[in-house]
Image: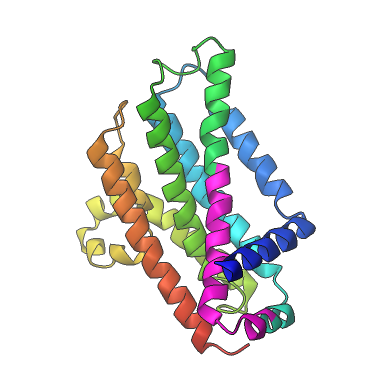
Amino acid sequence: MKTFNALFKYHFITYLKTNKFVIPMIVWVTIMCISYSVKPVGVVSSFVITAMCLFFIMLWITFSYMDGIDEVAEQLIILKTRKQSIYYLSKNIFLMLIGLFMSIMGVLLPIVGNFVNMFSLFNRELVMWDIFSALIIHVVFAILGCSLGTLFQPRCIKNRKIAIELAIFIAVISLVKVGIMQKVPEVKYIDWILPPTGEIQDCFNNKDIFYLSDIVKSMLYGIIYSFVLNIINIEMLKRKLF
């Protein structure tokens, strides 16, 4: 636990020094302002849309964070901790914690806006279940964005242009793959390779209430896929020399 705490502190200080969090934060706030500029909005649809946007924001944050890591410093930290897996895992969890913070923002800001506007921002009154469900959905999409981004860090793909293009392509296709499968059923045999963002989005289509079954299904999609990606990422880095 002490090692994890020290690593988290290191990641936090390193990330703050880069100031790379400023632009994504501004973009995130701008997206929310635009999303809730026209009212009233649907409770489920509005939260799902901002959660999908957060998926791309966290992919961006992960890219920028990984690109800013100094390989020499990374080697020294690994030598000091003597545990590669813990170091790599601490990086991934740190990014997920950023995703949690961004998720809280994504849910809290519209709630504050709804309160300020005398409960007229949404097309119905919010209940605690809506707030809890919205937070879960945002966290799931944020974690998926982080997990996908870790696979395209410089240690894995040296050519950053190819890494960015490939990551964006996969992210976009993952969102529209449900529609693609309806036209090309054969795609279902390889769709499991892509993040389950499309399936999660499909769970909430044309609904104005968060159902428990959809929330549980979304959590399972996100947890299982992110767990697999993190395992793949850590094993790749352990086998790949600097």
What span is colored magenta in the figure?
Answer: 77-102
Q: Position of residue 50 (x, y in %)?
A: 49, 38
Q: Residue at x 71, y 47 (%)?
A: 23
Residue 37 visible in the snapshot: no
Which of the image's four quarters has the N terminus? bottom right
| Magenta: main secondary structure | helix
Q: Position of residue 46 (x, y in %)?
A: 45, 30
Residue occupying the far left of the picture: 185
Residue 126 visible in the snapshot: yes
- Considering depth in this image, is 22 or 76 the residue closer to the camera? 76
Q: As displayed, is residue 130 above or below residue 23? A: above
- Considering depth in this image, is 216 or 8 the residue closer to the camera? 8
Q: As displayed, is residue 81 above or below residue 228? A: below
The number of numbered badges drawn on the structure is 0
Q: Is residue 111 magenta?
A: no
Residue occupying the far top of the picture: 118
136 sits to left or right of 159 = left
Q: Residue at x 40, y 23 (%)?
A: 42
Q: Position of residue 34 (x, y in %)?
A: 59, 29
Which of the image's four quarters has the C terminus? bottom right
Q: Quadrant of residue 161?
A: bottom right
84 sits to left or right of 177 = right
Q: Position of residue 200 (x, y in %)?
A: 33, 47
Q: Is residue 93 magenta?
A: yes
Q: Residue at x 29, y 30 (%)?
A: 206
Q: As displayed, is residue 217 above or below residue 37? A: below
- Considering depth in this image, is 201 or 2 the residue closer to the camera? 2
